[in-house]
Image (tube, helix red, strand yellow):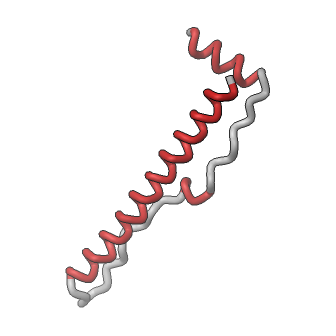
């Protein structure tokens, strides 16, 4: 209850959150499977997609950490 009250009070105090970067909302698609293509090539593309998704998650966490840090200093 206290947390909800504090959140409502902060919103009323005019703390405007920055917009979430568009890149952080994007979903990563699976690598396309092409008939007759070697499985290792498909796996390599899938791993690249996973690397992109993991990097995006890292940017999301950094954005959140920066935001909470700025809000704590604002108090």
Q: Residue at x 36, y 74 (%)?
A: 31
Q: Is residue 33 left or right of residue 39?
A: right
Q: Is residue 72 left or right of residue 55?
A: right
Q: Please identify the residue farthest to the front as the structure is shown.
A: 73
Quarter assignment of residue 14: top right
Q: As rendered, which of 9 and 66 lies closer to the eye? A: 66
Q: As rendered, which of 33 and 44 lies closer to the eye? A: 44
Estimate the x, y position of residue 7 in percent, counting from the top left: 64, 20
Q: Residue at x 25, y 88 (%)?
A: 37
Q: As rendered, which of 22 and 18 lies closer to the eye? A: 18
Q: Which quadrant would the C terminus be assigned to in this image? A: top right
Q: As rendered, which of 2 and 71 lies closer to the eye? A: 71
Estimate the x, y position of residue 55 in percent, counting from the top left: 43, 59
Estimate the x, y position of residue 25 in percent, counting from the top left: 55, 54
Whether 28 is drawn above or below 74: the answer is below
Q: Is residue 46 left or right of residue 63?
A: left
Q: Is residue 73 left or right of residue 43?
A: right
Whether 49 is drawn above or below 14: the answer is below
Quarter assignment of residue 45: bottom left
Q: Please identify the residue farthest to the left as the structure is shown.
A: 39
> How many numbered marks appear?
0
Estimate the x, y position of residue 46 in percent, counting from the top left: 32, 71
Q: Please identify the residue farthest to the top as the structure is shown.
A: 2
Q: Residue at x 50, y 53 (%)?
A: 59
């Amino acid at each position: 209850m206290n947390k909800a009250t504090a959140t409502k009070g902060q919103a009323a105090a005019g703390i405007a959150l920055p917009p979430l970067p568009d890149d952080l909302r994007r979903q990563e698609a699976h690598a396309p499977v092409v008939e007759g293509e070697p499985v290792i090539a498909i796996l390599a593309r899938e791993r690249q997609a996973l690397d992109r998704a993991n990097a995006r998650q890292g940017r999301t966490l950094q954005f959140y950490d920066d935001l909470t840090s700025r809000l704590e200093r604002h108090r």
